Image (spheres, rainbow, N blue to C red):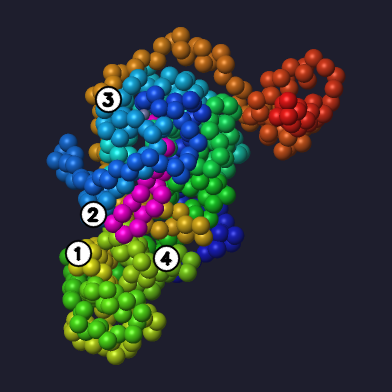
Amino acid sequence: MTAFRRMEETTPEQYADIGMKSGLEIHQQLDTGKKLFCRCPVRPYTDEFHAEILRHMRPTLSELGEYDGTALMEFKTKKEIIYQIHQDTVCTYEMDDTPPFELNQEALDIALEMTMLLGCKLVSELHIARKQYLDGSIPTGFQRTTILGVDGSIPFDGGRLIRIRQLGLEEDACREVSDEGHRRVYRTDRLGIPLMETVTEPDMRTPQEVAAVAHRLRWLARSTGRVRTGIGAARQDVNVSVEGGRRVEIKGVSRIPLIPLLVHTEAYRQVALLEIEKELERRKITPSSFESSTHDITDTLRATSYYPVAEALKNGLEVRAVVLRGYRGILSMRTQPETTFAREISDRLRVIACLDILPNIAHSDMEGETLSSTEWTKIKKLCRTGDNDAVVVVWGNEQDVETGAKEIVIRAREALDGVPNETRRALPDGTNGFERILPGPDRMYPDTDLPPLAITEERIRKIQEILPELPWAREERYLEMGLRPDIARRMSIAPERDLFDRIVERTEYDPSLIAFFLLGRFRAECRWG
Ligand SMILES: [Zn+2]
């Protein structure tokens, strides 16, 4: 087996061998006084709220008359969505789909500046689009978004260019507070804050390169001096694929140092899923020969001493066994460190059937640790299981256990096709878990509330006049002056940088001393003064 390899022991050639590619979407909040499409102020986040609103999410048909995969998935979860509202930071625009105000011009100028710094071709006219969001993180079900420029690039190590696909401006979504059972809670203070989205092409070839490019793009954004900093002000989505796999998106990574391990682990998860696909092919299981069956085993397990099931039965829940013909051993195949294919199934049940108390399944590849051998024998007899089959046991209320049993079959069947198109969430240990099915391409549609907005020559010229020197060029210059690397980096985006340049030009003082004075003492005195 190729899987599994530790990141420290993996060479760039080995990533090339598995055909790893990765790209980034960087979301950066802009430092404006007001939100993007209404006049609500941007305030620090708070736990305080004045009202709660309850919504149920419903899928809507796309223009083609089809349900999007993500939409269907969200519908299956039957979630209640609660919004906790602070009266100072939300108006009827965010909550109610009342028409938007004019796009925030301050936000537009900052985003245009970044678009130019990335060397993108600017659009001549802004068109606002709606992007469907069905997880409830945007109460109206869609996010307003617009593209400012395309086809840029930034220089990277060794004279390479990382291509920038596009830069967009959009409204931030709600903050998720909790997600338990059939209830998800959001706070609305983040909703509507201007967010700049920079999308790269999948030009990165090692996990370390992805982190380095993320760092470079955040550095560039900070050089405008007009972006928000602090926890959650910048967040990355990282997409990863390997040869024969599919593009998987890891959402909402807030810290850059986490990126390399996440990318590495995802690349080798895909390699592992491709090996499982090959193994099933070797067993001659195909989508048309795939067989499964579901059985009610609630009564069979009445007397069990396996704690999770015993508790479930005590609470009046039901138990099902799902037989996967020919799948013996598949569920214990490794997909991530300390993680097997069984978790791919368990994750889907957690998210889609809301069976989020773990463990939520037991399976016949790890008999010893769950039900007793007598119980497994009884179940297998009842389900007419053969030696080559796998059995997955799931428990929950009638509705959830039915949804769960269906999802077990769906995920097992998807194993025949390698890597499913998914978005996944980053976990603190560097592994990732299922989040949702990747949305289809038809989730964008034109917004009819706002007319197109022309970007005038005058406006472009004004921004060009104040366009800062690229931070890496500036850093280079400061290093040549003899500044320490950490000081050169800090000064490259410091508000005092122009003052620094002028003093260096007009005096004979040592630049290091001037930098020290400006970054250290001067700032401290300003704070006291
Ligand atoms: Zn508002």
The Cα atoms of the two marked residues, 4 and 1, are separated by: 29 Å
Q: As drawn, which residue projects farthest toward the front?
A: 50
Sequence order check: which comes first, mark 3 or mark 1?
A: 3
Please give the name of the residue rendered at 38% of the width and 74% of the height, measured from the top-left corner. 332
Question: Which residues fall within the magenta stretch?
Answer: 165-189
Q: Is mark 4 within 8 Å of ligand 1?
A: no
Q: Secondary structure at mark 1?
A: helix
Q: Are marks 2 and 3 in contact (CB under 8 Å)?
A: no
Residue where numbered disc 3 is placed? 99
- Name the spot of residue 137 as percent of width and height, x first: 34, 43
* Residue behind mark 1: 399
State whether residue 194 appears in this view: no
Judging by the rendered image, the residue that carries numbered circle 4 is: 335
**12 sits to left or right of 387:** right
Q: Secondary structure at mark 3?
A: loop
- Tell me, yes or no, whether the two marked residues, 4 and 1, touch with CB atoms within 8 Å: no
| Amino acid type, residue under disc 4 in the picture | Thr
Q: Amino acid at mark 3?
A: Pro
Contact check, label 2 and label 1, Cβ < 8 Å: yes
Q: CA distance from mark 2 to mark 3?
A: 28 Å
The residue labelled by disc 2 is: 78
Whether residue 113 is situated above or below residue 229 in the rendered picture: above
